[in-house]
Image (tube, coloured by chain):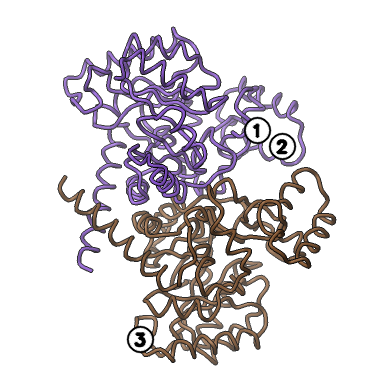
Chain colours: A brown, B purple
């Protein structure tokens, strides 16, 4: 969500009781600027709730880092300077990096900045717990858009299996947050039924008014239906963009387009990349969509997204719908 | 589930208020015998509930057919002779086959046998509705074990997207049943939160006492954890077993074993098949497990299954857990 998760998006989510996140990236100055903008947006609104994440004088939002490509010292400097409520991390080169980062961030914040770690398997969950004792585990299922494990379960079995494994290992005090394919209140209610304490939405916020993505990308998010077949997992997007360094077990889910079709039909990466770069230079509407080549990361829940809305509306609608679903079924089942 | 779904399994599920299913297969005589056994098991128990599926004098269980490989006339003859409550179908060569089968079965049963159709995408759901107006749509997500679509979403986004598409198309009277990765009451509660009226479990019943599978297979179901990474989707199992005829978009999810590892490392199908057949002939314990070659179909929920239990216990525990979860969260959210 680097670029997409703007200060305005994070601030809007936090302002209505969610937890907004911005993406850490690799450079201190760029991140420092984004954090300052977010802080200033939040402080300019008297309506910002004094929610629980705002205790200890921490700033009421989080920052996400891909450990493998990011600099721990940048994260530590940002934490020292701004004291964000949460540092979220994932995709380390080695699991032990979770421990190193967590220690450094806790030291820098006097234990006030909380550590969220995102994993995609039971093994990763247990390893992350042992390495870093995170304050929250984010469980990313195979339906998620963008980067994630090339192979894994969806949240339907991942959440309960991790829940049970943690309980068996005496580590069930850690709250679980589900991610991947969750796009509205139904998904959030399902996550809670599965044993999660909350849910993360990424793709849904690509269709927020505050999202920092190209209009062509956002139009695709609205246009595409049947997300399980119109998106697919592949390393193609990294290959044509020339992104190197993701640990071997990762790929990314994106809307399948001409680049994917050509790759399937045997086109070399070199040629695919050249055509992609031409499209990027052209930059018109034609480069988006199934016959285009622009990378459009999206999860399988993309087919549920029909409109671009203010982020605050997305958060409130989702929370209300989830609560209503759980209330209604609770009433039904209490009569049995 | 051909072979696995024994008369005893189906009868046990039905007896405690679920809906037991047997697999249709291709031969009239074999199926006729299995149906007779199921009927006789159910009638020998006075405790069989006079549930809603037993109205119209239909037999209180269902029969599943893979349309592509099964004979419609066999299904029609069985329906005429035994009047099962449900015929479940999926994987036709052409969508129009759904219509042909549905008409023939409704004719043969005077509209008493209900038609359930299993699909895996929004497109398939809409096509099936138009072709056959099924009484129930079964939505199979990518976490399911055994055969299914090679590419698709899990139930987390598939169920709500189909729900919305049906509503938009004015066909939202059809109940949805979710399948794939659902292994206990948490999964069922999640399915209901997503908009389904119920759930199907396959892999869970492989670890029922009544399941008709090899002990080695059943031991694998109990042993394996972290189902998202220890199972994988592939056409390998069909290739080494010499199963031909599945429509091109299908593959199967099974526990990854030596055959999969060898295929990944470049072994020819011919050699892989020869080694598989040798293993099948040997038949000892060694042919199961990660270093074996026996085919062990299982969904990603396999890691949640820790014991072999009577099917009745599985059904009752699952229903009780689902109701308890929905009740508890309903109470929590009604206080907000």
Disc 3 target residue: A47
Disc 2 target residue: B263
Disc 1 target residue: B236
Q: Residue at x 43, y 24 (%)?
A: B64
Q: Depth-wise, is mark 2 or mark 1 nearer the camera? A: 1
In the rendered structure, are the residues bearing label 2 and label 1 in contact, judged by CB atoms less than 8 Å apart? yes
The subunit letter for the residue under badge 3 reads: A
Q: Residue at x 46, y 68 (%)?
A: A309
Within 10 Å of disc 3 (Cα), the crowding (few <14, some 14-19, many 20+) is few
Count of numbered circles on the image: 3
**Element assignment for label 3:** loop
Q: In screen coordinates, is A179 left or right of B248?
A: left
- Residue B333 at x, y = what percent? 25, 63
Q: Residue at x 24, y 31 (%)?
A: B16
Q: Nearer the viewer, residue B302 or A193?
A: A193
Q: Is residue B254 in view from this perspective?
A: no
**Element assignment for label 2:** helix
Within 10 Å of disc 2 (Cα), the crowding (few <14, some 14-19, many 20+) is some
- Residue B286 at x, y = what percent? 59, 31
Q: Which mark, by number, is residue A156?
A: none
Quadrant of residue B245 in the image? Answer: top right
Q: Is residue A306 above or below residue B196?
A: below
The subunit letter for the residue under badge 1 reads: B
The subunit letter for the residue under badge 2 reads: B
- Residue B172 at x, y = what percent? 35, 41
Q: Are marks 3 and 2 on the same chain?
A: no
Q: Depth-wise, is mark 3 or mark 1 nearer the camera? A: 3
Image quadrant for the N terminus of chain A? bottom right
Within 10 Å of disc 1 (Cα), the crowding (few <14, some 14-19, many 20+) is many
Q: Is residue B220 above or below residue B36?
A: below
Q: Are marks 2 and 1 on the same chain?
A: yes
Image quadrant for the C terminus of chain A? top left
């Amino acid at each position: 969500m680097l670029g997409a998760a703007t200060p305005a998006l994070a601030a809007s989510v936090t302002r209505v009781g969610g937890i907004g996140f911005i993406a850490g990236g690799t450079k201190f100055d760029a991140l420092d600027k984004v954090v300052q903008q977010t802080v200033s947006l939040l402080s300019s609104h008297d309506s910002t709730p004094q929610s629980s994440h705002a205790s200890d004088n921490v700033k009421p939002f989080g920052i996400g880092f891909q450990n493998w490509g990011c600099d721990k010292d940048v994260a530590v400097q940002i934490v020292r300077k701004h004291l964000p409520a949460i540092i979220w991390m994932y995709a380390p080169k080695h699991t032990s990096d979770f421990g190193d980062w967590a220690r450094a961030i806790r030291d820098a914040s006097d234990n006030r900045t909380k550590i969220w770690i995102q994993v995609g398997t039971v093994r990763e969950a247990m390893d992350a717990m042992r390495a870093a004792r995170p304050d929250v585990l984010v469980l990313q299922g195979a339906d998620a858009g963008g980067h994630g494990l090339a192979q894994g379960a969806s949240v339907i079995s991942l959440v309960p299996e991790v829940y049970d494994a943690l309980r068996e290992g005496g580590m069930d005090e850690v709250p679980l947050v589900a991610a991947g394919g969750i796009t509205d209140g139904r998904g959030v209610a399902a996550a809670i039924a599965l044993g999660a304490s909350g849910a993360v939405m990424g793709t849904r916020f690509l269709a927020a008014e505050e999202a920092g993505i190209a209009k062509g990308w956002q139009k695709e998010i609205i246009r595409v239906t049947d997300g399980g077949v119109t998106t697919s997992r592949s390393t193609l997007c990294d290959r044509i963009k020339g992104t190197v360094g993701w640990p071997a077990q990762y790929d990314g889910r994106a809307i399948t387009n001409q680049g994917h079709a050509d790759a399937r039909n045997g086109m070399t990466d070199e040629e695919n990349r050249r055509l992609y770069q031409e499209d990027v230079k052209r930059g018109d509407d034609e480069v988006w969509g199934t016959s285009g080549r622009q990378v459009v990361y999206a999860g399988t829940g993309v087919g549920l997204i029909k409109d671009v809305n203010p982020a605050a509306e997305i958060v409130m609608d989702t929370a209300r719908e989830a609560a209503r679903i759980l209330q209604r079924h609770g009433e039904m089942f209490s009569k049995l």
